Image: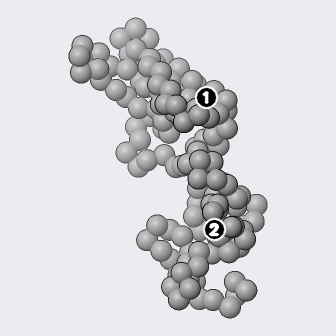
Amino acid sequence: MLRNHTWGNHNGGYSYNSIDRLQFHREANNTDDDLYTDHINNKTFDNRVENLRTVTAKENSRNKSKHNTNTSGKQGVSRWTNNKNGLQYWKVAINDNDDKRIVKIFSIKKLGDIEAKRQAIECRKRLEQQFGYIGD
C-alpha cells in the first residue's frame, strides 16, 4: 500500500502524502486514529519498524527532543535565576505519572556551577527512569 503513494517532506520533518494527507510513519506502523506513532530515536525520517512504536499522547510527550536553545545538554535541565534573591541554580523540571510537575533546584553558589549542573542532570536521569521517559 505504501508504494502506491508519492511521499513528500512536511515542514515538521515527517514524510506525508499530499493527496490523502497520510503520514508515512502512521501508515507503516498501522497506528489507530486515537493513538500516536513515536519515533524512538526522534529522527522523523527514520521510519524503520524497529524505530516506531504506538503510544498514547502522554507517552509520546515523554520522548521529545531537546529544544535547540538547550544549554545544559539534557532535556528538562536549565539554568535558572531566582528573581527574589538573584541566586542562580540548575533546575530540573519533569512531570510525574499523574502529570504533577516536579521541580528540583541545585545551588550554584553552594555546589559550584559544574557540580550543580552534574547533580541536576543525574537527578533528571533518575526521574526519567522512575516515570518511564525515554530521555534524550
Q: Quadrant of the C terminus?
A: top right
Q: Nearest the camera: 82 or 54?
A: 54
Amino acid at dot 1: Leu
Horizontal side of residue 17 vs 49, given as left or right:
left
Seen at 40% across and 14% down, the residue is 107
Seen at 69% across and 67% down, the residue is 31
User: Nearer the viewer's eye, disc 1 or disc 2?
Assistant: 2
Image location of residue 7, percent across then percent down: 58, 83
Q: Give me the disc on residue 127.
A: 1
Q: Which residue is mark 2?
A: 33
- Indicate the secondary structure of the residue bearing disc 2: loop
Residue 129 in view of the camera: yes
Image location of residue 83, percent across then percent down: 24, 21
Can you tell which quarter of the image residue 72 is in?
top left
Q: Nearest the camera: 110 or 34?
A: 34
Horizontal side of residue 71 vs 84, given as left or right:
right
